[in-house]
Image (cartoon, coloured by chain):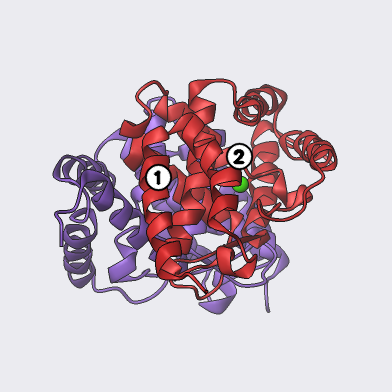
Chain colours: A red, B purple
Amino acid sequence: MTEKTRLDRQIDFLVEADKLKNTIRATELCDGSRYENSAEHSWHLTLYALVLADQGPEVEINLVIKMLILHDLVEIDAGDNPIFGQLDHAAIEAAEQAAADRIFGLLPDDQRDHLRAIWEEFEAASTPSAQFAKSLDRFQPPMQNLASGGGSWTDYDVTEAQIHDRVGSKIAIGAPGLWDYAKARIAAFFAAHKST
Amino acid sequence: MTEKTRLDRQIDFLVEADKLKNTIRATELCDGSRYENSAEHSWHLTLYALVLADQGPEVEINLVIKMLILHDLVEIDAGDNPIFGQLDHAAIEAAEQAAADRIFGLLPDDQRDHLRAIWEEFEAASTPSAQFAKSLDRFQPPMQNLASGGGSWTDYDVTEAQIHDRVGSKIAIGAPGLWDYAKARIAAFFAAHKST
Ligand SMILES: [Ca+2]
């Protein structure tokens, strides 16, 4: 067995990343035909960033896009955690750190450190770019649900107040204009679907 | 009906783009479990660009990533055209231009023009960044086929010479180092799977 080259390690990582196409999220496609996976979700978010960059004037948009390409890779090992489920945050954090060690560890050392640092910045959510990336990650599912006529809100029996609490507060941190927009459309949706 | 706002048009475009998750390609996942779709493929290519940027020292990597985010959107209307199938290039070109008119046309005018120009630069393949993006688009399917043990080569009964002709020549234009790597692995694969 010969030593792996730099390119061998890069390809090992890229082939491993393919597994993200099998991580299923709680969000449906806009046509309601199936649940989306985390790989196509990540692509969709990079397109959100490209189109909605004007909602985050303080951000480095190229860095935001890199964060969104990488943000869900740890789900290959740790799985997706639906925002309206019951979550053990400490256990999730530990699982994601172990996943990051393993998955980024496939890369050559310099790239392991560089891409891990971008992911850690996203996770910490303390810079404007990371906050904007996190806001887009929260903003896309409501847009899917509005398009499909309920989606995960129906599946998880979610109330408008829960959306404000768990999603709205987080969208508003990085992209207040997007939360204003979503809030109005969500209010109209729940008004139209009120069961009394 | 009130006039659509800038944000309404941006969201219309992003919801329409969701349909790319239903465009099925001829390439299988690395585990051979199903065919990949063009949305998750696009995500995978942005990750290829991020990791393999050192194979294209002349390129603007942020522009390459934007090209790869956008490169398959026209397939929502025009479909995917497997490289080993029989192709009518003039008909494909016309269908893709009509698709670009419709899909980018959903955006506010300034963004329609900006994102369309990035896609047109990719299509024309006359700049180093576009050539590198095109090379990655050709390089990922062989990596999938090597991982899954044949994939679309088996499905389409492809020979090593056909891969050199239809894929290798195009990878080599923008990323000669990647073609050297792929060529050696493909030779080893066909040597091991020779049916005599
Ligand atoms: Ca996520």
Q: Is residue B161 visible?
A: yes
Q: Amino acid at mark 2?
A: His
> Which of these two is toward me, A171 or A51?
A171
Dot 1, crowdedness within 10 Å: few (<14), some or many (≥20)? many
Task: Check residue A71 in the rendering and tell me which mark sits there, or answer none.
Answer: 2
Along the polypeptide, which appears first: circle 2 or circle 1?
1
Q: Position of residue B73 (x, y in %)?
A: 33, 58
**Where does label 1 land, which residue?**
A48
Horizontally, residue A178 falls left or right of residue B196, namely left
The chain that hosts pointer 1 is: A
Q: CA distance from mark 2 to mark 1?
A: 14 Å
- Secondary structure under tag 1 reads helix
Quadrant in the picture for the N terminus of chain A? top right
B113 versus B22 height, above or below:
above
Of A155 and B122, nearer the camera is A155
Badges 2 and 1, same chain: yes
Mark 1 residue type = Tyr
The image quadrant that residue B109 belongs to is top left
The residue at the point 42 percent across, 23 percent down is A60
x%, y% of residue B27? Answer: 53, 67
Is A181 on the left-hand or right-hand side of A131? left
Task: Tell me: is circle 2 under 8 Å from ligand 1.
Answer: yes
